[in-house]
Image (cartoon, rainbow, N blue to C red):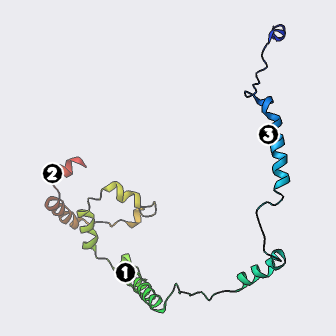
Amino acid sequence: MKQKKLHNIKETGFKVPDDYFNTLENVILSDIKLKKVSKDSGFKLPEDYFNNLEDTIIDKVSTKTPTKVISLFRKKTIIYLSGIAAAVLLLFYISFPEKKPAFDSLDFETVENYIMNENIGSYEIATLLTEEDLLEEHFIEYKEGDEDTIETYILDNLDIDDIILE
């Protein structure tokens, strides 16, 4: 369908400025006259410019002015920083002793007070025990005379609510 409309196009789409062909001859002749009159471009180079160019560049590059060097690490700052580092190392050495406390040196009352004051339950204690710890051999056998002592301990230290809940 597009091919049928091609023979109907009356305009090419190109436009020429007004009086272009009338003034074209004058423009070309004026350019030719200008080139005849001015053979010189107007720019002048000094004599032997390209012969001496390499030498002048090398002279400018090779002359170095001494630069002033400022040290980043002065003796005073190094001493200051090493003193701080020594103080920090000493602090860590003092606060973390090499000898760890042993459980053998703890008193029975200290452990008992810790368990009572920290609200540690029986389930948390049971998770720390192994099967070997729960063998019958490790429990103390009470004599008949000790029953009175156990009974007075229970009556003095436990509430009725604790006995009922257990």
Front-most of residues 89 and 110? 89
Residue sitting nearer the eye, 50 or 132: 50
Using a 10 Å C-alpha cutoff, classify the residue at mark 1 as few (fewer than 14 neighbours), some (14 to 19) or many (20 or more). few
Q: Give the CA separation, mark 2 to mark 1.
A: 46 Å
Q: Which residue is mark 2?
A: 160
For numbered disc 3, what is the local secondary structure? helix
Q: Amino acid at mark 2?
A: Ile
Q: Amino acid at mark 1?
A: Ser
Count how many numbered circles sit on residues in the image: 3
Between tags 3 and 2, which lies in front?
A: 3
Which amino acid does the dot numbered 3 rest on?
A: Val
State whether residue 147 is above or below residue 47.
above
Residue placed under numbered mark 3 in the picture = 27
Location of mark 1 (residue): 95
Contact? badges 3 and 1 (CB < 8 Å): no
Marks 2 and 1, the one that precedes in the sequence: 1
Percent across and percent down for residue 154 are 18, 59
